[in-house]
Amino acid sequence: MKAEYDFSNAKRGGVRPVHPAKGKTRITLYLDDAVLEAFRLQAQDQGLGYQTLINEALRGKILTKQPKPVTVADLRRVLREELNAA
């Protein structure tokens, strides 16, 4: 080993978290103040973290396969197709 090392041209590598959460990623997300306040109040009432509630709401939305609402454009298209077929 050398007595001294020159780190003047060194580049910092990636920083690893001390305890990485499995299956989760830290992000920055901008939410409306009213939305955030509603989640914080709900979290306080339930004794949970507001970020946990936001995560559960997002997970619930993507896991429930709700049919897409019918738009006016969809309705017009279907009516045109049916009238042309008749």
Image (spheres, rainbow, N blue to C red):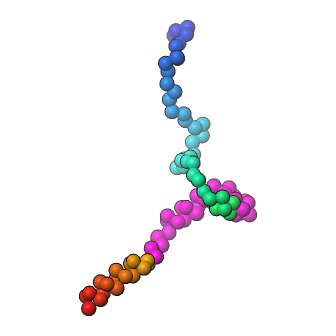
Q: Quadrant of the C terminus?
A: bottom left
Eyeballing the image, is 12 above or below 81?
A: above
Q: In the rendered image, which quarter is residue 77 located in?
A: bottom left
Inspect this view and state whether residue 39 appears. Answer: no
Residue 63 spot, x, y in % from top left: 49, 65
Eyeballing the image, is 22 above or below 60?
A: above
Residue in the picture at 39% in, 77% down? 73
Inspect this view and state whether residue 13 appears. Answer: yes
Magenta stretch contains residue 6: no
Residue 39 spot, x, y in % from top left: 66, 61
**Residue 65 vs residue 45: left or right?**
left
**Residue 18 vs residue 47: left or right?**
left
Q: Residue furthest left?
A: 85
Residue in the picture at 57% in, 52% down? 29
Magenta stretch contains residue 57: yes
Residue in the picture at 55% in, 10% down? 4
Residue 55 spot, x, y in % from top left: 58, 58
Q: Residue furthest bottom?
A: 86
Eyeballing the image, is 70 above or below 38?
A: below
Magenta stretch in the rendered image: 40-69
Q: In the rendered image, which quarter is residue 81 located in?
A: bottom left
Tally the numbered discs: 0
Residue in the picture at 55% in, 8% down? 3
Residue 1 spot, x, y in % from top left: 51, 10
Eyeballing the image, is 17 above or below 37?
A: above
**Residue 78 vs residue 57: left or right?**
left
| Prevailing secondary structure class for the magenta stretch in the rendered image | helix
**Residue 21 vs residue 67: left or right?**
right
